[in-house]
Amino acid sequence: MWRAVAVASAPARVLFRAPRRPAVSVAVSPAAALADERVETRVAGLGPGQPVTLRAVAADERGCLFQSCAHYRADGRGELHLGTDASQGGDYTGVEPMGLFWSLAPAGMERPYQRLVPRSTGTPIKVEMLVHQGHSQPGAFPGPVVAKAEVERWFTAPGVRRIRLKEGRVRGSLFLPPGDGPFPGVIDMYGDEGGLVEFRSSLLATRGFAALSLPYFDFEDLPKVMKEFQLEYFEEAARFLQRHPKVKGPGVGVIGTGKGAELALSMITFLPEVVAAVCISGCSSNTIADLHYGEMSLPGLRFDMNKTPSLPIEQFIHFLQEKLHPAHSAQNAFMPSLSKLPHWLKRCLQSPGWCLNLH
């Protein structure tokens, strides 16, 4: 009889078990998107107030590993939304919906100061999003993975055409949007890394611009090093783009980063074909390489390498000092145009960067 009662009561024990918590999940939407588009990242299935570390991991075409991490706590429902919830530590703090992407940096075993940029615009960068138990510090071994997802960041869209250029002295790649056009034309230049950098031009073409990715040294038969530049090369590129049948005139724009920003400033100063410029992280003085245009020459402001050993890299620009020879002074290297352009809008961001006496 007692055995029968025990058997009969066995199923009753199941009725009093605590409900099982759903598995932890991370969802990134959209899972495939252009690299300049925002994605939504949500985590569900956590315990109320549970601490977790979100980590992003990606590799470039050479196999170099990049990663980032941030610390979060789940809300009362065991959920996280990076669009509204603040990171409490890691590589950034505060509400940063795309923080795990913009804070990606070389992993500890990799050479520092590398950039995660695609060599081929037709292949996405794949980013793995990981949720780890607990708060782990950057560089430390993280806790167990409780959820993961993969995101693809694309740098081109269907229908964008890429045309390699060898027109006169001009080298580079022209990216054209789908359709008949005409499209606004933009010349795109990067900095002292040299070579041909195409990913921004490809993205610009997806947004409706005819974008010319323009190298100016260390590519094909262009100069191997930044010693001196002839502005006539950039003038030829501007005229080529301005006269292209797919480009809407009357002028073209230019966007540049680093040394490319200085060259963009020179182009809008001296070239009538250029009517708009976006200069990112550049200097209003000409640096490093002398710039020539006709009979005009702007000396390149040089580095004082004797001061480099004792300064951290974020103060790198403060190495720029005047040479003993007056031809290399900051005053002689200053771009002469800022006060002459009636529609010039200059935005100076005060952060570790260029010395103010060079602006």
Image (tube, grey):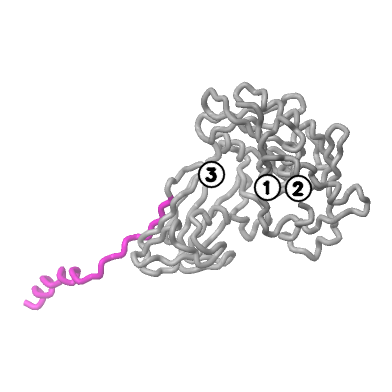
Residue at figure coordinates x 50%, y 52% from the top left = 128
Quarter of the image for the N terminus: give it.
bottom left
Crowd around label 3: few <14 · some 14–19 · many ≥20 (10 Å): some
Disc 3: which residue: 35
Distance CA(mark 1)–CA(mark 3)? 27 Å
Percent across and percent down for residue 107 are 61, 58
Q: Could you say which is closer to the camera, residue 188 or residue 109?
A: 188
Q: Position of residue 203 (x, y in %)?
A: 57, 38
> Is 127 on the left-hand or right-hand side of 274?
left
Residue 25 highlighted magenta (yes or no): yes
Callout 3: SS: loop
Give the alpha-carbon distance from disc 2 to disc 3, as whole Å: 30 Å
Measured as percent of width and height from the top left, residue 140 is found at 57, 67
Is the C-beta separation of discs 1 and 3 under 8 Å? no
Q: Is residue 205 on the magenta stretch?
A: no
Q: Nearer the viewer, mark 1 or mark 3?
A: 1
Q: Amino acid at mark 1?
A: Lys
Q: Which residue is mark 1?
A: 346
Task: Determine the CA span between mark 1 and mark 2.
Answer: 10 Å
Q: In the rendered image, which residue does mark 2 sit on?
A: 284
Q: Is residue 230 above or below residue 181?
A: below
Q: Mark 2 or mark 3: which is in front?
A: 2
Task: Give the image location of residue 206, x and y in percent.
Answer: 54, 35
x 10%, y 71%: residue: 8
**Amino acid type for the residue under numbered disc 2:** Ser
Marks 1/2 in contact by CB < 8 Å: the verdict is: yes
Q: Secondary structure at mark 2?
A: loop
Residue positioned most to the front: 342
Among the two numbered marks 1 and 3 on one chain, the one whose residue lies closer to the N terminus: 3
Q: Which residues are magenta?
A: 1-28
